[in-house]
Image: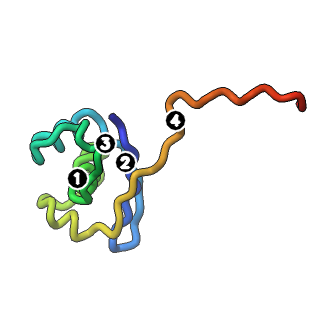
Amino acid sequence: MQLTLDIALTDGNRYQVTTNLFTIVALERKFKIRASDLEHGVAIEHLAFLAYESSKQHGITVPIVFDDFIKSLATVDVVEADPVNPSEPAPSATP
């Protein structure tokens, strides 16, 4: 499971990071949930944690304490991606 997160900070900075297997496992360990549970809804704290861990993985400097990172967040949004297997366009008579 990979998510691309758009992170906006209260200081006006904005960046995107992508989760990886490490960040998903870290989420499962910290919150005692399975990644598959996220299909039923994602808590804002879970998104913030994924943003925090992904930021560290991408070499972005973040506060040592997770709650301090949350204080610096304005928003965290999941970036919509194209479908993995998009359907083929239907044939048409016009070129």
Of circles 3 and 1, the one toward us is 3
Relative to 22, does residue 13 appear above or below in the rendering?
below
Q: How many marks?
A: 4
Of circles 3 and 4, the one toward us is 3
Disc 2 versus disc 4: distance between alpha carbons? 19 Å
Reading the image, the residue beneath label 2 is 17
Reading the image, the residue beneath label 3 is 39
* Type of amino acid at the residue the image marks with label 2: Val
Question: Which badge, 1 or 4, is on the more N-terminal residue?
Answer: 1
Residue in front for this viewpoint, 92 or 50:
92
Quick one: SS at disc 4?
A: loop
Reading the image, the residue beneath label 1 is 46
Task: Answer with the quarter of the image where residue 91 lies.
Answer: top right
Question: Which badge, 2 or 3, is on the more N-terminal residue?
Answer: 2
Question: Which badge, 1 or 2, is on the more N-terminal residue?
Answer: 2
Q: Residue at the spot x=83%, y=29% of the render?
A: 92
Do callouts 3 and 4 mark residues in contact (Cβ within 8 Å)? no
Question: Which badge, 3 or 1, is on the more N-terminal residue?
Answer: 3
Q: Residue at the spot x=26%, y=33% of the render?
A: 21
Task: Answer with the quarter of the image where residue 36 lies.
Answer: top left
Of circles 1 and 2, the one toward us is 1
Residue in front for this viewpoint, 21 or 42:
42
Reading the image, the residue beneath label 4 is 83
Quick one: SS at disc 3?
A: helix
Residue 32 visible in the displayed image: yes
* Type of amino acid at the residue the image marks with label 1: His
